[in-house]
C-alpha cells in the first residue's frame, strides 16, 4: 500500500473560497449567538454585586512611635491576616450575627475574597451577593468579626477601618459585553469548523483536477452536457 494514499492534501485556496462562499452563514451564526449571549446575560442570569471594605493593620507596641521595622513586619503579616479573615471561626460567627440560616461555612467562603496588595498594610475584604444590601452587610460584618479575631490571636492593640463597605450600585457580573463578544466569537468558530469539516470530508469528483488528484488518472478531454441534459439536471435539483 502506497503511503501517499494516507496523505490528505488540503487546497488552501479552495478552502478559503469555501469559507468566503459561506461567509453570510458564518456571520449570521455569529450574530445569532451574540444575541443569545446578550439575552442570557441580561435577562436570564441573576446579577451579582460586590461590596468591599478595607482595614489598616499596624503591629507596634503601645506608646511607641511607628518605625520602619514595624512597617516591614506588618507588611509581611498581611498574608496571615488574610488566612484569619477567611477562617472557619470568623465566617461561622458572621453567619450567626447576620442570621444566615441556610448558609454554611463553605457557601460563605465562596463569596468572600480577601486581597492583600503588595508592600501595603491594607487588607481588602470583598463580599458578593445577588442582593447589593446583603453584600455590604456581609463585608462589614466579616470586617468586624475578623478585627476582633485578629486582635486576640495576633495580640494587636487595634485595627483601624480604612474604608467601610457601601451598597454597590453596579453589578459585578455577568458582563453583558463580555458574554456578547464571547458568544458571538464561539458561534462563528463553531459554524466555520463545521464548514471546514464538511469540505475535508467531501470526496466527490467535481472537476478534472479532482480526477487526477483522487484517481491518479489524466483527463484526455471534457464532454459538455447538452442543453437537454442540463435542463434535466436543473429540474432534478
Image (cartoon, rainbow, N blue to C red):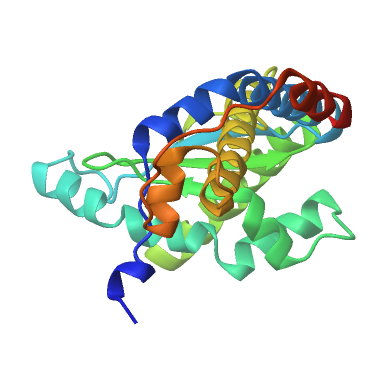
Can residue 160 be seen in this snapshot? no
Question: Residue 133 placed where, x, y %?
Answer: 78, 30
Q: Residue at x 45, y 48 (%)?
A: 211
Residue at image position (81%, 33%) is 131
* Residue 110 rendering spot, x and y as whole percentages: 64, 56
Give the left or right position of residue 63, taking residue 57 as reference: left
Say if 212 sits above or below 83 in the image. above
Q: Quadrant of residue 86?
A: bottom right
Q: Position of residue 101 (x, y in %)?
A: 89, 59
- Exactly how many numbered labels are in the figure? 0
Image quarter where the N terminus lies is bottom left
Foreground: 45 or 105?
45
Judge by depth and name the residue closer to the eye, 220 or 7: 220
- 34 up-or-down from 194: above or below: above
x, y percentage for residue 25? 67, 24
Q: Quadrant of the C terminus?
A: top right
Residue beneath the point at 64% across and 39% down: 140
114 vs 190, left or right, is: left
Q: Residue furthest left?
A: 68
In this view, the residue farthest toward the bottom is: 1
Q: Residue 165, located in which quarter of the rendered image?
A: top right
Residue 38 vertical placement versus 221 (above, below): above
| Front position in the image: 143 or 62 | 143
The answer, for residue 140, to whether it is visible in the render is yes
Up-down relation of residue 100 to residue 35 (above or below): below
Drawn side of residue 211 relative to residue 202, left or right: left
Q: Residue at x 30, y 76 (%)?
A: 2
Left or right position of 79 against 193: left
Amino acid at each position: 500500500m502506497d503511503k501517499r494514499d494516507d496523505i490528505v492534501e488540503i487546497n488552501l485556496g479552495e478552502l478559503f473560497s469555501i469559507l468566503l462562499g459561506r461567509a453570510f452563514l458564518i456571520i449570521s451564526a455569529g450574530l445569532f449567538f451574540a444575541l443569545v449571549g446578550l439575552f442570557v446575560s441580561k435577562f436570564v442570569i441573576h446579577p451579582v454585586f460586590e461590596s468591599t471594605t478595607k482595614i489598616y493593620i499596624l503591629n507596634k507596641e503601645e506608646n511607641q512611635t511607628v518605625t520602619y521595622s514595624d512597617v516591614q513586619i506588618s507588611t509581611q503579616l498581611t498574608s496571615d491576616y488574610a488566612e484569619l479573615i477567611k477562617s472557619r471561626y470568623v465566617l461561622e460567627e458572621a453567619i450567626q450575627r447576620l442570621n444566615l440560616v441556610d448558609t454554611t461555612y463553605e457557601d460563605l467562603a465562596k463569596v468572600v475574597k480577601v486581597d492583600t496588595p503588595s508592600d501595603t498594610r491594607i487588607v481588602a475584604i470583598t463580599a458578593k451577593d445577588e442582593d447589593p444590601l446583603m453584600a455590604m452587610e456581609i463585608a462589614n460584618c466579616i470586617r468586624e468579626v475578623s478585627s476582633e479575631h485578629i486582635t486576640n490571636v495576633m495580640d494587636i492593640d487595634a485595627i483601624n477601618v480604612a474604608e467601610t463597605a457601601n451598597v454597590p450600585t453596579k453589578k459585578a457580573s455577568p458582563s453583558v459585553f463580555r458574554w456578547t463578544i464571547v458568544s458571538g466569537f464561539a458561534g462563528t468558530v463553531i459554524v466555520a469548523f463545521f464548514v471546514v469539516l464538511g469540505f475535508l470530508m467531501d470526496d466527490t469528483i467535481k472537476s478534472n483536477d479532482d480526477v487526477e488528484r483522487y484517481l491518479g488518472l489524466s483527463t484526455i478531454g471534457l464532454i459538455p452536457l447538452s442543453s437537454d441534459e442540463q435542463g434535466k439536471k436543473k429540474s432534478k435539483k
